[in-house]
Image (spheres, rainbow, N blue to C red):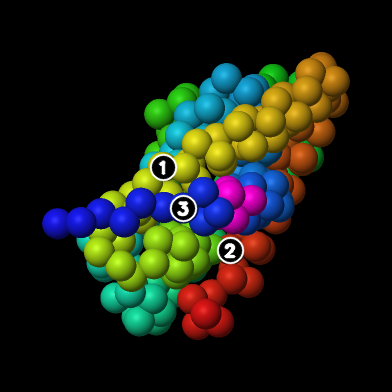
C-alpha cells in the first residue's frame, strides 16, 4: 500500500486556514472565556480539553468515513444541536440571574465548577456545534484529498488542527482570567456572573444560527 504524504504547501494552507478560523470568536472561544471568567484559567484548561475531545470525535468519524453520513442526515444532527443550544442557554441564564443577587450573595461565580464538570460540559457543547462537524467532516477532508492513504492524512491534519487550536484557546482563557482578576468583592463577583453568562448566551446564539443544511 502506497501512502502519499501531505505536501508542504497543503500543510501551510491548512494551518493558515485553521488558525484564522480558531482566532475567530465562536462557541468554543465563548465557552472558554465564560469558564475562565467563572473559574480561572487553570480550571478552564479542562474546558479546552473537552472542546478538543469533541473535535477528536468528529475527526475520528471522518477518518472512518462516517462524516459523509452525518452530513447527509442534517435533520438528525439538528436534534443534537438544539439540545446543546438549550444547555448553553440554561447555563448562561443561570449565571445572569445570579448576577442580580443581593450584596451578601454570590461569594463565588455561579458557573464555577470542578474540572471534570467543565470537561463534560464543553465536550457536550462542542459535540452539538455544527461548525465542528463541517470543519472535520467537510473542510478537512478536502485538504487530505482522495488519493490512497486519505484516512491517514485526515488523522494527521486533525492532530495538526488541535495542536494549533490549543494555544489559541489558552490565550483566550488567559484573557478571561485577566478580566476575572480585575473584579473582586461581591459586586465584582456579580459582574463575573453577568459576563460569563453573557458569553455562554452568545455561544448558544452562535450554535443556534449555524446549520449543516447550509453546507
Which residue corresponds to mark 3?
7
On-image quarter of the N terminus: bottom left
The residue at 63%/23% (across/down) is 41
Along the line of sight, the residue nearer the viewer: 8 or 190:
8
Q: Position of residue 184 (x, y in %)?
A: 82, 17
Which residue corresponds to mark 2?
207
Mark 2, other Cα within 10 Å: few <14 / some 14–19 / many ≥20: many
Mark 2 or mark 1, which is nearer the start of the sequence?
Answer: 1
Which of discs 1 and 2 lies nearer the camera? The answer is 1
Along the line of sight, the residue nearer the viewer: 12 or 139:
12
Q: Which residues are magenta?
A: 11-16
Q: Main secondary structure of the magenta part?
A: helix
The residue at 39%/72% (across/down) is 77
Q: CA distance from mark 1 to mark 3?
A: 16 Å
Please check the rendered image and state whether residue 12 is part of the magenta-colored stretch, yes or no.
yes
Tell me: residue 164, above or below residue 151. Answer: above
Q: Is residue 160 left or right of residue 172?
A: left
Q: CA distance from mark 1 to mark 2?
A: 24 Å
Which residue corresponds to mark 1?
159
Task: Name the mark on residue 12.
Answer: none
Amino acid at each position: 500500500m502506497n501512502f502519499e504524504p501531505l505536501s508542504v504547501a497543503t500543510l501551510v494552507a491548512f494551518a493558515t486556514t485553521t488558525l484564522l478560523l480558531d482566532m475567530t470568536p465562536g462557541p468554543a472561544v465563548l465557552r472558554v472565556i465564560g469558564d475562565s471568567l467563572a473559574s480561572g484559567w487553570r480550571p478552564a484548561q479542562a474546558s479546552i480539553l473537552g472542546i478538543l475531545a469533541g473535535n477528536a470525535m468528529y475527526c475520528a468519524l471522518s477518518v472512518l468515513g462516517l462524516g459523509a453520513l452525518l452530513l447527509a442526515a442534517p435533520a438528525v444532527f439538528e436534534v443534537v444541536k438544539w439540545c446543546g443550544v438549550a444547555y448553553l442557554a440554561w447555563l448562561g441564564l443561570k449565571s445572569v440571574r445570579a448576577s442580580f443577587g443581593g450584596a451578601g450573595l454570590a461569594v463565588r461565580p455561579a458557573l464555577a465548577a470542578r474540572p471534570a464538570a467543565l470537561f463534560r460540559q464543553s465536550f457536550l457543547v462542542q459535540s452539538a456545534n455544527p461548525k465542528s462537524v463541517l470543519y472535520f467532516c467537510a473542510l478537512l477532508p478536502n485538504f487530505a484529498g482522495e488519493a490512497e492513504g486519505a484516512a491517514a492524512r485526515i488523522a494527521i491534519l486533525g492532530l495538526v488542527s488541535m495542536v494549533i487550536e490549543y494555544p489559541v484557546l489558552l490565550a483566550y482563557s488567559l484573557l478571561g482570567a485577566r478580566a476575572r482578576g480585575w473584579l473582586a468583592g461581591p459586586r465584582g463577583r456579580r459582574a463575573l456572573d453577568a459576563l460569563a453568562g453573557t458569553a455562554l448566551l452568545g455561544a448558544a446564539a452562535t450554535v443556534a444560527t449555524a446549520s449543516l443544511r447550509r453546507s
